[in-house]
Image (cartoon, rainbow, N blue to C red):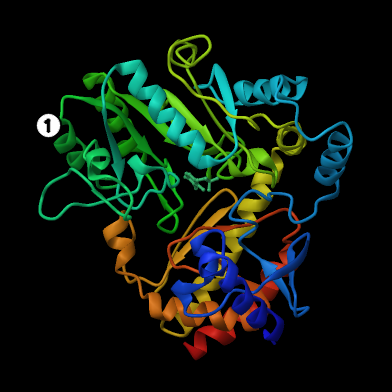
C-alpha cells in the first residue's frame, strides 16, 4: 500500500536530513513513515502509490479552500505570467494590507514577510525596539516558529527563565525568554516579578501547537491588564488562528486587543507568506520610517500576495463559510467522541471555527502539562489505522486539525464511520 513512499523516503534520507524539510513531516511521533504526495484535489491528498486520503491537515492550515483550488490557482498563474518577483513595490501588497487592516481592529499597519517564523521574529524585535527592553514572556506549549529566542523550554526547578530547546541556540539568548503557563495568570505575574525588563508577552490566543487549547477569556483580559500595568506589549500570534478561528481570527472571538498581531498560513493561500501588524505608533518604528531594522528580498512577493488576496477576499465576501466549517468541525469531533465513548476510550474534544482538536486524555486540557498527559501511544495507533483507511490526520497528538470548504458533510460522515472501526481496535 505504501511501497513507493517507503522507497522514496529511503532515498530522500540520503540527501535530506531525515528525509524531510520540516521535522513533523517525518511521522516520528506516530512511529510510521511519511507518505509522499503526488497531488492534492480539494479535500483529498493523493500519494505516489495512488492512495487517496481525506486531508484534515491541509498543509498545516493554509488551504482553507482545499487543495489546488481553481480560483487561487488562476490568481497565481495570471500574476506569475507578469514576473515572479521584482524587489520593488507592487499594488498587490497595498491591496492585501488594506484588507487585513480593515478586518483587524488592532492593526493600523502591516508588513509582509515570507513565513510565520519571520513574522514573529520581526514582531519581537519591534517590541524590543519600541519598549527599549530585552526580555520576553512566552507560554509553554505555544509555538512561534523556530527563531532562537523562541526555541525555549522550561528550566529545571521553579525558575521561569528558559533553557534552549535545541542545540545551537545560545543560552545567552534564551535567558531573555521567560516561560509562563498557559491559562495561568499567576505564572505570568511571577515572570514580571523576576524581571523588570519585559518588552512583550507573546501568546497564541487559541493555542494550536500543543493540540487545540483555547485561552480562557478572563485569562486574556488579565493578561492585557498586566501588560498595561507593566508597560509591556501584548502580541497575539495568529499565524494559525488568523482567518481560521473566525474571519478575524482569535481576535474576532475576544474583547482583548493586542498591540501587535502576527499572521501567516491562510493569508498566503498556500504560498509562503507571513505578516505582522499593529498600532501605527509601534509599526512606524520599523525601518525605513523608524530605526528598527527589518527586510526581505522576496517579502510581499507578488505571486504570494495574489494567492493571499484572492483567499482573503473570498472569505470576506462570504463569512458564512466559517459557520459551515465550524458546524462540520463540530460534527466531526462529536462523531469521534461518540465512537470513543462506545469503545470506552477517554477523549477530549474542542472546536474553534474551522480548527478542531482531540486529546486521548481523561481530563480537560488547559495547558501544556495537561496536554502531555495524553496517551500518545494510543494516538499513534489511531493515526496509523485511520491512514490505512484513507484519512490523513496530523501525525502528532499535539497538533490541530483543519476543515476546509471541500470537506463536505458526507466526507465528515465517512470519516466518523471509519473512526468507529478504529476505536474498537485501539
Ligand atoms: C506555524 C506557526 C508559526 C510558524 O510559521 P512558519 O510559516 O512555519 O514559519 C508561528 N506561530 C504559529 C502560532 C504557528 O502556528
Choose between 350 and 148: the one closer to the eye: 148
Displayed quadrant of residue 418: bottom right
Q: Position of residue 182 (x, y in %)?
A: 30, 47
Q: Residue at x 65, y 32 (%)?
A: 298
Q: Is residue 400 left or right of residue 347?
A: right
Crowdedness of circle 1 by 10 Å Cα count: few (<14), some, many (20+)?
few
Report whether 403 appears left or right of 148. right
Q: Is mark 1 within 8 Å of ligand 1?
A: no
Judge whether residue 389 can be spotted in this image: no
Q: Quadrant of residue 34?
A: bottom right
- Residue located 75% across and 56% down the image: 67
Instruction: Give the residue pinned by disc 1.
Output: 193
Q: Quadrant of residue 121?
A: top left
Q: Which residue is drawn at the image coordinates 51% and 75% (left, top)? A: 338
Question: Residue, x 56% and y 40% (percent of image)?
Answer: 115
Horizontal and vertical percent position of residue 70: 86, 49
Amino acid at each position: 500500500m505504501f511501497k513507493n513512499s517507503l522507497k522514496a523516503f529511503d532515498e530522500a534520507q540520503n540527501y535530506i536530513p531525515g528525509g524531510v524539510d520540516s521535522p513533523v513531516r517525518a511521522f516520528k511521533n506516530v512511529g510510521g513513515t511519511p507518505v509522499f504526495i503526488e497531488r492534492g484535489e480539494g479535500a483529498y491528498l493523493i500519494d505516489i502509490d495512488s492512495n487517496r486520503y481525506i486531508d484534515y491537515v491541509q498543509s498545516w492550515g493554509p488551504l482553507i479552500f482545499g487543495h489546488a483550488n481553481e480560483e487561487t490557482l488562476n490568481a497565481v498563474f495570471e500574476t506569475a505570467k507578469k514576473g515572479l518577483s521584482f524587489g520593488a513595490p507592487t499594488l498587490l501588497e497595498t491591496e492585501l494590507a488594506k484588507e487585513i487592516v480593515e478586518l483587524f481592529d488592532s492593526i493600523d499597519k502591516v508588513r509582509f514577510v515570507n513565513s510565520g517564523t519571520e513574522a514573529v521574529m520581526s514582531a519581537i524585535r519591534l517590541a524590543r525596539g519600541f519598549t527599549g527592553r530585552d526580555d520576553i514572556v512566552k507560554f509553554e506549549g505555544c509555538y512561534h516558529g523556530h527563531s532562537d529566542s523562541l526555541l525555549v523550554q522550561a528550566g529545571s526547578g521553579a525558575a521561569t527563565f528558559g533553557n534552549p530547546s535545541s542545540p545551537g541556540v545560545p543560552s545567552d539568548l534564551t535567558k531573555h525568554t521567560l516561560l509562563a503557563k498557559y491559562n495561568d495568570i499567576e505564572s505570568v505575574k511571577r515572570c514580571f516579578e523576576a524581571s523588570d525588563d519585559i518588552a512583550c508577552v507573546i501568546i497564541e490566543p487559541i493555542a494550536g501547537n500543543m493540540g487545540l487549547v483555547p485561552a480562557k477569556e478572563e485569562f486574556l483580559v488579565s493578561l492585557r491588564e498586566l501588560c498595561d500595568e507593566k508597560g509591556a506589549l501584548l502580541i497575539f500570534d495568529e499565524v494559525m488562528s488568523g482567518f481560521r478561528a473566525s474571519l478575524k481570527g482569535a481576535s474576532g472571538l475576544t474583547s482583548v486587543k493586542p498591540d501587535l498581531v502576527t499572521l501567516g498560513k491562510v493569508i498566503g493561500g498556500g504560498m509562503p507568506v507571513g505578516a505582522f501588524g499593529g498600532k501605527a505608533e509601534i509599526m512606524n518604528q520599523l525601518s525605513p520610517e523608524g530605526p528598527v531594522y527589518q527586510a526581505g528580498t522576496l517579502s510581499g512577493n507578488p505571486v504570494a500576495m495574489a494567492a493571499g488576496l484572492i483567499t482573503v477576499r473570498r472569505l470576506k465576501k462570504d463569512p458564512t463559510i466559517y459557520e459551515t466549517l465550524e458546524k462540520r468541525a463540530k460534527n466531526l469531533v462529536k462523531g469521534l467522541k461518540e465512537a470513543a465513548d462506545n469503545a470506552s476510550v477517554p477523549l477530549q474534544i474542542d472546536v474553534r471555527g474551522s480548527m478542531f482538536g482531540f486529546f486521548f486524555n481523561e481530563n480537560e486540557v488547559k495547558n501544556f502539562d495537561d496536554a502531555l498527559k495524553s496517551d500518545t501511544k494510543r494516538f499513534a495507533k489511531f493515526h496509523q489505522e485511520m491512514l490505512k483507511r484513507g484519512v490523513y490526520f496530523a501525525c502528532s497528538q499535539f497538533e490541530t486539525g483543519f476543515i476546509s470548504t471541500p470537506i463536505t458533510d458526507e466526507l465528515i460522515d465517512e470519516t466518523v464511520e471509519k473512526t468507529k472501526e478504529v476505536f474498537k481496535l485501539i
